[in-house]
Image: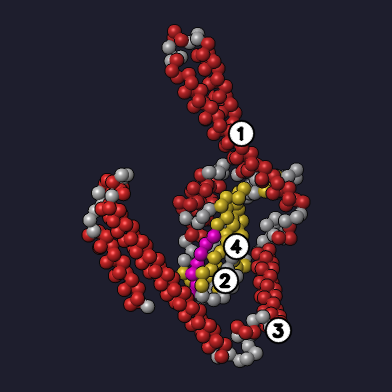
Amino acid sequence: MQKMIKIIVCAFLVSMMNFVSSPTANAGCQDYPESITPICVAENLAIAKLAQEAYEAAQIAKRLQEEQTARDNAAKDAAERAATIATDNALAPDDCARSTNRYLQRCIDIAVEKARIENENKSAADRAAIIAADNALAPDDCARSTNRYVQRCIDIAVEKARIENEAIDSIKKISELEVLQKLAFDKFTSNKCDQAANRILQVCIESKAGADAVKKEAASLAAKISETQALLTKPLVDANGEIILTALLRSKSLSTKDMKAVLDKSLLSTTEKKLLSAYAQTLNNLKSTQSLTDFKIPLSKSLTEDFSSTTPKVCTVADGVVKSLKSGACVLSIRFTTESGYEVQSTKKITLKK
């Protein structure tokens, strides 16, 4: 077949060479009345014949290529069927892994039962993980799955969302005012209202009034943003003076740089910032690699700490003591709080080795 294709391609090339080497038709042979002269008629017929031969050769080559592709695909399908048959022959006749058994009711039932058991095991593992996470939290902590529908926790979540939405709205208003201020400036700057001769012009009077209004509104919004930010970092207290929503400050790590970036955005006192930063550095100094022995986490005399393990299969933690279970990455969830309710949450990764 490859030889036949080569012969046809060679014939096509020879035809093209004859076409190129044949006398070129005069430009006039395409126009009447020269085109009907015997010389032009013969020349045009020769050109048309060569073009037809080239087209037919190309079509034959295309058809042969398609036939070869079809044969290749058939061979591939046959090879795959042979491989499937060989695999089936290596299995027992009643094995559900055989391709001829996959649609038998018995095999379908086995596959369904296997999927059901896997789903039940996954659901049980998820429930166990939720219970373990709940047990690491205080009974009244709103992060516990059993407390998410308690009215007190719902109220706290709603209040937090309201404060965050107010902050977002205030930032949007500031952005809109900045755009308006720029438009006002672009409109009135060409009049040079700072010149004494132009101050009494109506356009300049309107410009000053508009600028004053924008500045006043911007100052008002800036005050609201400051107040909202204070609420976001200030604990909410109920009528009895008890803290119901602490200021949660999340830090990527316990490093000095990350802690400073978090604390600088809060309205904490200098004393509280120093306490939180110093204790974070103490925790950060924990060795990144420990042997498979229990070790104690240093506790603070001025802060309230809470530790839990996010990798319970590798390690657990209770009363500030980390219990090593096996080699691997032990990730501790750390939370420490000041007396006024400011709370920092972060994680610490410790590699356990034999």
Q: Secondary structure at mark 1?
A: helix
Q: Is residue 352 magenta?
A: yes
Q: Is residue 127 above or below residue 45?
A: below
Amino acid on which disc 1 is placed: Lys
Q: Which residue is at 67% across, 48% downward?
A: 245
Does label 3 or label 4 sit earlier along the sequence?
A: 3
Label 1, label 3: how far apart the Cα atoms are: 70 Å
Whether label 3 touches label 4, CB < 8 Å: no
Q: Secondary structure at mark 2?
A: strand
> Quick one: label 4, few (<14), some, or many (20+) residues within 10 Å?
many
Does label 2 or label 4 sit earlier along the sequence?
A: 4
Q: Is residue 144 magenta?
A: no
Provide the residue designation for mark 1.
Answer: 224
Q: Which residue is at 48% across, 64% downward?
A: 286
* Main secondary structure found in the magenta portion: strand
Viewer-nearest of labels 2 and 1? 1
Amino acid on which disc 2 is placed: Cys
**How many marks are shown on the rendered structure?**
4
Provide the residue designation for mark 4.
Answer: 307
Provide the residue designation for mark 2.
Answer: 315
Label 2, label 1: how far apart the Cα atoms are: 46 Å
Nearer the observer, 261 or 54: 54
Q: Is residue 327 above or below residue 157?
A: below
Q: Tell me where the magenta segment starts and ends, as one range.
A: 347-354
Q: Which residue is at 25% across, 53% downward?
A: 39
